[in-house]
């Protein structure tokens, strides 16, 4: 929708929220609009001119709006994303039809509907996701893995630039903190994605060092694998609860039960158990993507089998 007039009225900082606004709008025979109003004891008035007729959007403007929509909708939860895409597709179809038959007024109306939709979904309502505690834990985890990798690399005589990696982690922490403070979902999600990439890179480095000096047997490796998977599951359970996704929370709790059962089987078949753990960790990663709205998932059905009765 086109903004005809924005009226800014300075009011005392002591004025309570929810103070009623009295507004009187009149239009004369020449289409001149005058506005008089009152907020508490503060009176104001303004004249409003009708906006000039808008020209048909150019192909470049249409393409630019399409890109803006795709960027904005990418970070919506799956349900909201579906609704937004249907609304945008409907308005775009009407716009193209109106433009094709030369109906300028209807085409402009439809294009403005598309613009309004992009504005709506770009505006963050409520807390951004995932919760700040999730972000803080990820930063802490990156620093801990970096510290561990530095120590292990030094003992093994392997190169690792601990300081540069620490700077990279801190840079993303600062970006994420700023994005969270501004409720900028896209920048916040980008910072989390970068931190996850750093964490995965560090885990890969640590694994290479561990392969050189690792003296654990298969059972001990499996036990550590289960411990890390349980930690991931606990985080995802809290994340799902915060999003109100009881279906995913229940699935994660089932994964935790399965991991507990697998810990009992690890002594007999550690390598077989590790394969099952990898499957559960892959599913936890999918659940995280669903909760963060990184991609549309048309099949949210459980992929978890109940191993609690396995022998």
Image (spheres, helix red, strand yellow):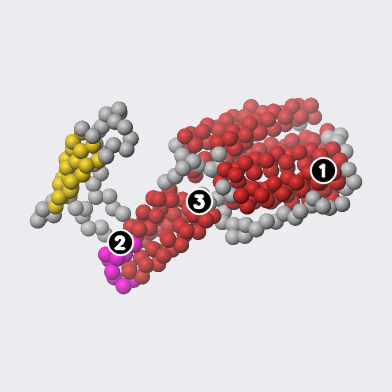
Magenta highlight on residue 193: no
Q: Residue at x 49, y 41 (%)?
A: 127
Q: Nearer the viewer, mark 3 or mark 1?
A: 1
Q: Residue at x 59, y 57 (%)?
A: 297
Q: CA distance from mark 3 to mark 1?
A: 37 Å
Mark seen at residue 263 = 1
Q: Residue at x 53, y 43 (%)?
A: 129
In which quarter of the view is residue 154 placed? Answer: top right
Range drawn in magenta = 100-110
Q: Nearer the viewer, mark 2 or mark 1?
A: 1
Q: Would you name the residue on which mark 3 appears?
A: 76
Give the mark, 2 or 3, whose residue is nearer the N terminus: 3
Where residue 174 appears, as percent x and y from the top left, is 52, 32
Give the mark, 3 or 1, whose residue is nearer the N terminus: 3
Dominant SS of magenta comes to: helix
In the image, 253: left or right of 24?
right
Where residue 203 appears, as percent x and y from the top left, is 71, 38
Magenta highlight on residue 105: yes
Q: Nearer the viewer, mark 2 or mark 3?
A: 3
Mark 3 surroundings within 10 Å by alpha-carbon count, few (fewer than 14), some (14 through 19), many (20 or more)? many
Q: Would you name the residue on which mark 2 appears?
A: 108
Regarding residue 289, the answer to whether it shows in the image is no
Question: At numbered mark 2, what does the secondary structure look like: helix, strand or loop?
Answer: helix
Mark 2 surroundings within 10 Å by alpha-carbon count, few (fewer than 14), some (14 through 19), many (20 or more)? many
Where residue 132 appears, as percent x and y from the top left, is 55, 36
Question: At numbered mark 3, what does the secondary structure look like: helix, strand or loop?
Answer: loop
Does 106 sit above or below residue 278?
A: below
Does 189 sit above or below residue 309?
A: above
Mark 2–mark 3 contact, CB under 8 Å?
no
Q: Residue at x 13, y 54 (%)?
A: 31
Give the mark, 2 or 1, whose residue is nearer the N terminus: 2
Does 263 sit above or below residue 117?
A: above
């Amino acid at each position: 929708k086109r903004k005809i007039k924005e009226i800014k009225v300075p009011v005392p900082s002591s004025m309570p929220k929810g103070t009623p606004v009295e507004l009187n709008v009149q239009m004369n025979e020449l289409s001149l609009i005058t506005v008089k109003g009152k907020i508490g004891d503060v009176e104001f008035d303004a004249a409003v001119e009708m906006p000039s007729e808008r020209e048909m959007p150019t192909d470049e403007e249409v393409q630019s709006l399409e890109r803006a929509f795709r960027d904005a909708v990418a970070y919506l939860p799956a349900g909201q994303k579906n609704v937004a895409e249907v609304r945008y597709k409907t308005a775009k179809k009407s716009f193209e039809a109106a433009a094709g038959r030369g109906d300028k007024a209807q085409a402009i109306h439809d294009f403005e509907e598309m613009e309004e939709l992009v504005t709506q979904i770009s505006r963050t309502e409520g807390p951004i996701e995932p919760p700040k505690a999730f972000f803080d834990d990820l930063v802490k985890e990156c620093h801990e893995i970096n510290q561990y990798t530095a120590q292990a690399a030094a003992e093994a005589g392997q190169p690792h630039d601990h300081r540069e990696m620490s700077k990279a982690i801190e840079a993303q922490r600062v970006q994420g903190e700023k994005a969270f403070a501004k409720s900028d979902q896209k920048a916040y999600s980008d910072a989390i994605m970068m931190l996850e990439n750093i964490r995965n890179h560090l885990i890969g480095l640590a694994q290479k060092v561990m392969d050189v000096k690792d003296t654990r047997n298969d059972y001990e490796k499996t036990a550590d694998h289960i411990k890390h998977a349980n930690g991931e599951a606990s985080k995802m359970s809290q994340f799902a609860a915060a999003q109100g996704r009881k279906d995913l929370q229940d699935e994660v709790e089932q994964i935790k039960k399965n991991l507990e059962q697998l810990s009992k089987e690890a002594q007999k078949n550690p390598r077989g158990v590790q394969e099952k753990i990898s499957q559960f960790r892959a599913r936890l990663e999918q659940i995280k993507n669903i909760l963060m709205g990184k991609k549309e998932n048309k099949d949210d059905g459980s992929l978890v089998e109940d191993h609690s009765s396995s022998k």
